[in-house]
Every structure is written in C-alpha cells, then in structure tokens.
Amino acid sequence: MNKIKILSKGLAFFCLLPLISSLESKPGSSEHHALKLPDPVTSFGACRLGKYLYVYGGHMGEAHVYSKETHSKSFVRLNLEKKEGEWEALPFESTRQGFGMAAHRGKVYLSGGSQATNEEDEESNLSSLDKVSVFDVKKKTWRSITPLPDPRSSHEMVAHDGKLYVIGGWHMADGKGVNWHDHGLVADLSEDPIEWKKLPKTDWVVRANSAAIVKGNLYVVGGLNDEGTTNAVRKLRLKSMKWSEVEDFPGVNRLKAFGSASVELGGNLMVSSFSYQPKIFLDSNRSWISTQAKVQDKRFFHRLVPLNQSKVLFLGGASWDGHLDGIEVLDFSPEVEIEKKNVKAGKADSKSSNWGGFRGKGNSRSDSLNLPLGWSDESNLAWRMAIEGYGQSTPVVWGERVFSTSTEGEESERLLVHCHNLKDGELQWCKSVPTPVRIKRSQYVSQAAPSPVVDASGVFVFFESGLLMGLSHSGTELWSRSLTEEYGPMMGNHGIGGSLFQSADSLGVLVDHDGPSYLMRVDKATGENEWKTDREERVSWSTPTLSISENQELLFTSSNGVVECFDFKTGKKLWYKDGVEGNTVASPSIAGGLVIVGSSKPEQTQAIRCGNEGVKGGEVSWVAEDATCSFSSPLATERFVYLVNRAGVATCHNLVDGKKLWDLRLPGSCWASPLHAPGRVYFFTKEGATVVLKDDGSTEKLSENSLSIEGKIYGLAAAENAFIMRTGSELICLREPLTP
C-alpha cells in the first residue's frame, strides 16, 4: 500500500481572528497567539455553536489538589467572525470540572462533573454531580433539566442528531468511594422533559476518556480503567446499538490516551493525546496515521474544537510543567480530502497488489505483469513458512499482509486465523478461537476449507463450525457470530467447502448441505444479515461468483443440478437453469456475457447466458461435449475457456462457441484452479508441478516447474509479483528477485 501522507505540509499558526473567513496557511515555524484562555485550566468544557466558541469552568492549580479555590468560575465566549475580538463574559452557573459539555440548536448543555466545597486548607471532598444544566444562548439564561440517573464525572458528552450521548466516567463521594459506570446514557432532546436511557452495557469501564461521533459511530478513546491508562478504542454503531473494538490508539508514553481529546475532522476521527502529533483514524482501512502537522505544547486534559473540515483549535490542558492557557490553531491542508479518497477501500493500492478472496475476484485472473515464470527449490523461492494447524483454504492478500486459516488438533479443536508478512513470511499474529464442533480432519476435510475474504476494512473468515467473524488487519475482532447456533449444524460427508465472497460493503455466504440450506448477504461493518434466502437441501462445495457493474450486482450459483442468478442487492432470484449434473465442486466463471459452469460429468460443462436487457438469462450458449471439469474451476479469459478434468487433462475452448482447440495431459491432477496473467495461463498440479502456457489458443509451453512439497497444493494467491501457494500446513512464496 502506498504510504499515506494525510496531513499536510506542517504546522502553521495564524492570527486567531477571524478564524473562519480569513485563516490562511503559512508554512514555517510555529508560534502561539497572544490571545489566551481566561484561566489556565484542565478538565474544562469547550464547544462551538454557530459563530461562537464557548469555554466553561475546569480545574486550576496543582494536579490532584482540589478546593473551592481550584475551580474556575469562568464562562466566556468568543466571536470567531470578528477580525478583532475579546472574550465575552457570560452568566456563570456553578463550579464543576470533569463534566460533559455539548452544543445543539442554540443551547449549551452541561452534564455531571465533580465539585469540591472544602476550603484550601481542608481535606478535599471532591464529589461527582448528577446535575444537568442548559444555557440558552439568545436569552443568556440557565435552567436545570432532568438530572443524570446517578452522579457521574470524568466522562464525555457529545450531541448528535438531536440526542445527547454520555459515555465513560465514575462516581466519587467526598474524594473516595469510587464506583465505575459500565453503561453510557442517551437522551432525546425533542422530549420534554428529557429521559436518560441506558446505552448497551459494556464489559469495560473507563474514565478520563475522549469521545466523538463519526459517520454514525460513537468512538470512545483511551482513558483510565481500574488497571491503569489505556489505548483501547471502542465503537458503538448507533444504528444497531452494538459495541465493537477497533485498532488501539498508538499512544506510546505512560499516559497513553489518558486525558485525550477527540473530534470529527473531514469525515474521520482525529485524536490528540500527550504528543506533538495528533492521530487520524481511517475507518476505511482501520489504521491510525500520524499527522505531519505538530503542536508546540504537548498537552492532555485539553479540548479540540473544529473550525471547519481542516482547521482545529487546541485549547488549554496541562503539560508536565503545569496548566496551560495557550491556544493553538492547526491547519490540515486540503490534501486530507484527496488522500482520504485515495485510501478509501484500498484505492491507493495497485489492482495487482491484492488478492481479495477465493480465486481473487472470483475469476482466477491477475493483471500483474511481474509474476514469476519459472522456479524450483533453488530458484525464485522467496520463502516458505509452516502454518500452525491444518487447512485447505486459499490464502488472501492485502498490501503487505497474507491471511490464511487453519484448524488445530486431530478433531479441529481450535480455529486459527494467521497473518504473515508478504515480504519475508514472518508471522505477524495468530487469532485462536475454540470450537464446540469436532470434526476428524483428512486431506479432503477440515473446518478450514472455506477461504476468507479481505479488503481495506478487514479480513473476514468462515469455518465449518459455523463461525463467521470479522477481524481488523491487525487481528482485533470486529464482530463474530455462530451460524450453526442460529440455523442448525452443518451436515455432510465431506464437510463445507464453499468460500465467502464479497462486494464493497457486504459479504456473501452460501451453505449448501444435507440440512436446511441458505444463501445470505451480511453487512461487513456489523456482521448482521442484510437478507437471507432459504434453499432446499443440496450438497455442494461450489462458491458463488459475483458480477458487479455500476448499476447491478449479479450473483451466480452452481449447485447440485441447478444454476441460478440472483440480484445480490436484494436476494431476488432472476432466473435458474436446472438439469445440470455433476456441478457440485467447480465454481462458475464469468466472461463475455456468459457464465461458465464446470461439471465432472460429460456433456454437462456448459456456457449459459448471463442475461441483460436484450438477452434472456439462463439460455445455454454451448456445451463442452468431450471435456469435463472436476476439482478446479473453469478459467475464462477474453477469448478462451480452460478446463482441467479429474485425471489432469487440460482442454482449451473458444469462449464464443465452445469449440475445443486442444487437450494436454498435465504432470498431475489439479485441485487449484488455473490462473491467468497477461499472456499466460498457469496450471498448478496438486503435487507441486506447474505448467505455464501461452494464452493464444496454442499449447506453446513457456515453462515447466517443479517444487518439493509436503502434502498437496490446495490453492494459491497472486499478488503484485508473487505467488503464495498453500498446502495443508505450509505457505510457499514464489517471487523473482528485483533487478537493480
């Protein structure tokens, strides 16, 4: 993946007023503006409403020293549109620190916080509050509204879509007696009086965290729990109200993300911790990126206030030297939007650098011009790496990561997901999950036969136990579910072999077996069903193939006597062709408006019209009369169709009419599907021999290669300039060395 340079050409500080209309980037050395906060404060509140910046309360003085005198009694605002201006004092409501503050539709809201009423020379009685107050900016008056269900401080509050969300915090009484809150709160501001309702309970507690809502997700970042400071980041999807974990914040010092500040910026989450460089979280590929822009003062317990989609105010907080009253403005250039678009869904990667699923994009075709032509045990063998456990799934590749699955134990007691470095094969991480389903493995059967899929958002795996799981690229679980618990056990003599398939935002799952079968579409972000279609019992190991255009997503299945076409967006069946025999293993291939269906029986491998506005789908275009297709799937290119039968005899046919051009006996039978690269067709036998032919309708051999292996070649991936072969317990990378 191209290195992301998201945030621009350095830090520039500017005349603070007017911030909105005339702030211009000025590269060079940074400096603080003369305008400061009324008090040097931490644990205060700040928000923007219209043209005004509002700042309220907080803590002054030494750390961990609390009294009436250490509370700021300031409530001020600043007109951001004036060329010259000063703080305007507003009516003060009550002293508090560590409270939530948010603005919405002409009102400023305060929730909870803590307050000390002791004198300076008395023992601190800092206690949490349940008080919720609202300031009407037009009337400049305060009033109290429905209090929090329990006193809460050291939390965050954000406003979104007419609602207030409170998350994190604890309950203090007289400086001691701490109770942590394991649930957040939400209140609908359209109700009068408002009612505080609990968000889904969490299995974690945190305070001194930060929070922001980005694209319908509530992010909770870092803070402090009962074990110490943390970099953990959680996400609540507001639509489904389900919690999940995302990539940890990359905080490296002892504070980690304790006392951080978060804000939405340009459609992404921006977080500032005790560091010179803020971080941006790109949800599209679940990664944190350090900004090139820097602040002069590292700070925590500060506030961020966005001015627009590229400019942010840094206010107050504390350094190791004490409390701060300084204000800094960071300008993140328009490159934010440009780079965001480049990295969304992996667009910054070249097409050939990824192999997203079984047969790549479901067609066993690579556009790479640099795949190796020849290799042996002594030549172009980049690395080989043993995989813990055993499996038959195809590896998948995204950028510099290779993902694979396996099972551990003779009866597949544990399910494993591996991530290896593409460059040298080193194991990056391994996710291990127990399974209650025990299946004795063989060279034909394991729970790890279905291949995963991967894209910029994560890697998604499916096992015969019914486990369907989404993981980040670094192995963090995003969501998981058990299909066997939901829909019944997988039943069949030879296991489940159908692999996952994918569109941009969704997964496809086909389960055909000796029980209630089904086809479903699943949301990648949540793991929830978008639709599910029940099917008759039908045993199959075929994987459906997607044909995606700008206006249409057509899904083709070939399964135990029937070929079907579905609208993948809705699950509606568009047409079907029955009477097909022996089509239970090979997956269909799409080319030239035809779906090529492989069959192990004579005169059953055929080309069927996909269908469009002018052509009826489901009509047979041609039949391969004296050729079959067994374990491997048909390979369809722009001109030809390649088939391999059970005995290892390959045939080549014209795509248009099916005429057989030649047949050729390979050095052995093939379990992996043939693969096409520009000008070449690769045939990988299960024993490690490979034949490379010229893709011109002839039998001209470009190379023959042999590799010593243990086990069988089950499948492979092609990424950039490398092949990654998979045996039951090994990954093998073939790559020509780069020339100077």
Image: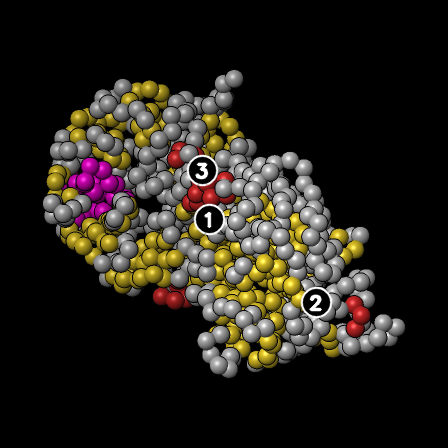
Which residue is at 34% across, 53% downward?
A: 508
Q: Which mark is residue 284?
A: 1
**Which residue corresponds to mark 3?**
348
Residue 407 visible to an observer of this rendering: no
Structural crowding at the residue carrying mark 3, measured as other residues with C-alpha within 10 Å and reported as few (<14), some (14–19) or many (≥20): some
Which residue is at 66% across, 75% downward?
A: 93
* Residue 443 percent across, percent down from the top left: 40, 44
Q: Is there CB contact under 8 Å for labels 3 and 1?
A: no
In which image quadrant can residue 181 be found? bottom right
Of residue 324 and residue 644, the one placed in the foreground of this image is 324
* Residue 235 percent across, percent down from the top left: 52, 60
Label 1 or label 2, whichever comes before in sequence order: 2
* Residue 496 percent across, percent down from the top left: 35, 53
Label 1 and label 2: CA atoms lie apart by: 41 Å
Magenta region includes residue 584: yes
The secondary structure that most of the magenta stretch takes on is loop
Residue bounds of the magenta highlight: 580-608
Q: Is there CB contact under 8 Å for labels 1 and 2?
A: no
Q: The disc labelled 1 sits on which kind of residue?
A: Ser
Residue 214 visible to an observer of this rendering: yes
Q: Which mark is residue 94?
A: none
* Residue 94 percent across, percent down from the top left: 69, 75
* In the image: residue 288, left or right of residue 613: right
Q: The disc labelled 2 sits on which kind of residue?
A: Ser
- Viewer-side label of 1, 2: 2
Q: Which secondary structure, mark 2?
A: loop
**Which residue corresponds to mark 2?**
74
